[in-house]
Image (spheres, coloured by chain):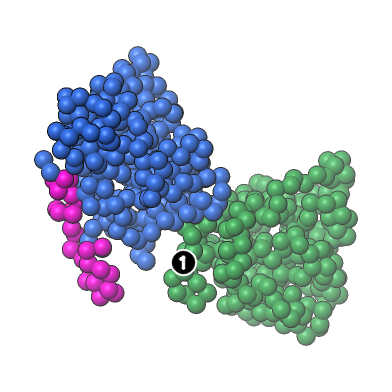
Chain colours: A blue, B green
């Protein structure tokens, strides 16, 4: 499998409405909406920031260099991974809210990845809801997708259910991180969990050898380099002293997650209501 | 339907009276009520800057302009007139309207009259209320507490408060919630109705480039105000329909 297999450029390209073409929007821009991936989880330590990184690398390898937004003002983990493309924000400031939502909804070809810290979870979705972000973004050819990472607790699923209801016009991908361990009994019985029984957009972060998992957590490791660099070369970054088998496992894990991301973003895009109540 | 006059006034400046008037104009427009507005802030006219299509600047102290407002009430196609009274002129205007017999016509049922009295958070406001009360009796009297620009709560002594309001048994209390400062500022700069700011329109009708976050703040705030005006039955009271429970 090569990088181009992941490209989002190929299949879905709705024909340009004539009135749009007349007004001179660049054809390829209008035909190819960019994604705004919003990564969130109710609690901390769910692998959210790692997943945001994987998403950013997925877009990078697809030829959509992403803009990355980190809402964790104190830790700024993502900035270490993408020092040149990461904007760190303090959502308690109106100015930063504008920087985030106005930029993410702007008409431009880059993919956008937003890592929503659990500290600002409610604030983020309140502002997102109040500013009618989904239809505003869609009106500018940006397709938002919420990646919601559940954890072992019932309240996480319940929150996910409410999120799905509140943003019924936006694709919500349920991400289950196997690394967090089996779900609690109480969770399996909860209404929130069962609400996702027939949910279409689901994906899983598969289990990973602990040593590999530790290596992958290193913020400085470039995941796209893990994919593009020959496995036979073990020197230095990005493989951090892993054995051949571990390197192969890391790559296999990434490929699997990329493939899932590809599948769900495609599905999200094809389900998106065909364009815009608001046209700018 | 009877012609309606709604006065918005305050006895002192800086309580956001014109902002309240703007919310009322947006509210009425959203309810498909045709409305004309008089801006008594002569000769500048802040209200006129935001709602130029429906607003005329008047000098409320002159007989000529008083006639312009009152004499056209019965003949105008537009049945609702909102008068934004400049700071310090509320009591005086009410007196002038009494002198020309306007309130007699209201009592005879020719017109409907409502008064939105925007008060500040200080105790001085209470004296203001006392001064206006004689004119407000028997009318639709709204006491508007305006929180738009500050978060400080009204620190009125409840006993004093009740004493003042004993004279206005049918006074209705309206609360205008706080609006995000940056959003408020940007609407000021844009110089358009709140609804146009939310709809991303410039004053010339062209598409604006307002921040969607700030538009969101204004939209949510307007929704809350609409709920508040609905709650007190503003429209029903002005139309003299069965007043909604306050």
Name the residue at 86% across, 51% down.
B123
The answer, for residue A259, to whether it is visible in the render is: no
**Image height check: is A166 above or below B181?**
above
Looking at this view, name the residue that lies furthest to the top: A185
| Local SS, label 1 | loop
Check the image and report above or below for A163 versus B202: above
Please tell me which residue is depicted at 17% across the width and 29% down the height of the picture: A248
Q: Kindly indicate the quadrant of the structure image that contains residue B156.
A: top right
User: Where does residue A140 sit, x and y in percent of width and height?
Assistant: 34, 60
Region rendered in magenta: A3-29
**Near-viewer residue (A177 or B88):** A177
Q: Does residue B38 appear left or right of residue A181 in this picture?
A: right
Compared with B227, B135 (above or below) is: below
* Residue at image location 27% in from the left, 34% down from the top: A236
User: Residue A183, position in %: x, y?
Assistant: 33, 18
Q: In the image, is residue A108 part of the stretch drawn in magenta?
A: no
Can you identify the residue that label 1 sits on? B209
Residue lying at 36% horizontally and 35% vertically, measured from the top left: A219
Where is the N terminus of chain B found, in terms of image quarters?
Answer: bottom right
Up the image or down, A274 lies above or below A161; here it is below
Residue lying at the far bottom of the rendered structure? B64
Q: Residues within 10 Å of mark 1 (few under 14, many from 20)?
A: few
| Side of B13 where A259 appears, left or right | left
State the residue lying farthest toward the left. A1
Give B23 or B245, whichever is nearer the viewer. B23
* Position of residue B145 measured from the top left corner of the image (x, y, whole percent): 73, 52
Quadrant position of residue B109 = bottom right
Q: Percent from the top left, x then y, of residue A227?
A: 20, 39
Relative horizontal placement of residue B24, taking residue A242 as reference (left or right): right
Residue A187 is left or right of residue B20, and the answer is left
Residue B202 in sight here: yes
| Residue nearest the viewer, comparing B133 with A66 | A66
């Amino acid at each position: 499998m090569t990088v181009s297999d992941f490209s989002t450029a190929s299949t879905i390209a709705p024909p340009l409405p004539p009135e749009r073409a007349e007004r001179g929007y660049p054809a390829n821009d209008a035909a190819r909406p960019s994604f705004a991936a919003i990564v969130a989880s109710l609690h901390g330590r769910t692998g959210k920031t790692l997943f945001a990184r994987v998403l950013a690398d997925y877009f990078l390898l697809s030829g959509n260099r992403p803009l990355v937004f980190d809402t964790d003002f104190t830790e700024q983990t993502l900035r270490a991974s993408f020092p040149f493309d990461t904007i760190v924000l303090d959502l308690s400031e109106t100015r930063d809210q504008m920087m985030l939502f106005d930029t993410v909804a702007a008409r431009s070809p880059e993919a956008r990845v937003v890592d929503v810290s659990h500290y600002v979870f409610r604030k983020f979705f309140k502002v997102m809801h109040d500013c009618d972000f989904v239809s505003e973004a869609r009106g500018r050819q940006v397709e938002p997708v919420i990646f919601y990472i559940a954890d072992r607790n019932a309240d996480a699923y319940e929150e996910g259910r409410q999120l799905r209801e509140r943003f019924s016009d936006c694709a919500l991908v349920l991400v289950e991180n196997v690394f967090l361990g089996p779900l609690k009994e109480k969770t399996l019985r909860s209404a929130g969990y069962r609400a996702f029984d027939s949910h279409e957009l689901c994906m899983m972060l598969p289990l990973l050898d602990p040593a590999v998992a530790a290596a992958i957590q290193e913020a400085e490791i470039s995941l796209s380099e893990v994919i593009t660099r020959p496995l036979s070369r073990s020197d230095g970054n990005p493989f951090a002293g892993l054995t051949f088998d571990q390197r192969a496992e890391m790559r296999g894990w990434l490929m699997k997650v990329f493939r899932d991301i590809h599948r769900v973003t495609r599905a999200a895009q094809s389900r998106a209501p065909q364009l815009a109540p608001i046209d700018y | 339907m009877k012609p309606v006059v709604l006065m918005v006034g305050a006895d002192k400046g800086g309580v956001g009276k014109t902002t309240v008037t703007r919310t009322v104009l947006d509210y009425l427009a959203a309810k498909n009520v045709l409305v004309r507005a008089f801006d008594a802030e002569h000769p500048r006219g802040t209200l006129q800057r935001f709602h130029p299509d429906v607003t005329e600047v008047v000098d409320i102290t002159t007989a000529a302009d008083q006639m312009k407002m009152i004499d056209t009430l019965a003949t105008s196609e537009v049945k609702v007139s909102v008068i934004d009274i400049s700071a310090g002129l509320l009591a005086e205007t009410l007196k002038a309207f009494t002198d020309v017999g306007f309130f007699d016509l209201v009592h005879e049922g020719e017109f409907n009259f409502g008064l939105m009295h925007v008060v500040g958070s200080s105790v001085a406001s209470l004296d203001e209320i006392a001064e206006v009360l004689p004119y407000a009796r028997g009318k639709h009297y709204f006491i508007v507490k305006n929180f738009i620009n500050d978060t400080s709560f009204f620190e009125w002594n409840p006993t004093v408060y009740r004493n003042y309001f004993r004279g206005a048994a049918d006074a209705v209390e309206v609360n205008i919630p706080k609006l995000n400062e940056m959003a408020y500022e940007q609407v000021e700069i844009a110089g358009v109705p709140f609804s146009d700011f939310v709809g991303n329109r410039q004053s010339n009708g062209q598409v604006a480039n307002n921040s969607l976050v700030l538009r969101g703040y204004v939209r949510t705030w307007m929704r809350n105000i609409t709920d508040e005006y609905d709650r007190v039955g503003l429209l029903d009271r002005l139309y003299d329909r069965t007043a909604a429970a306050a």
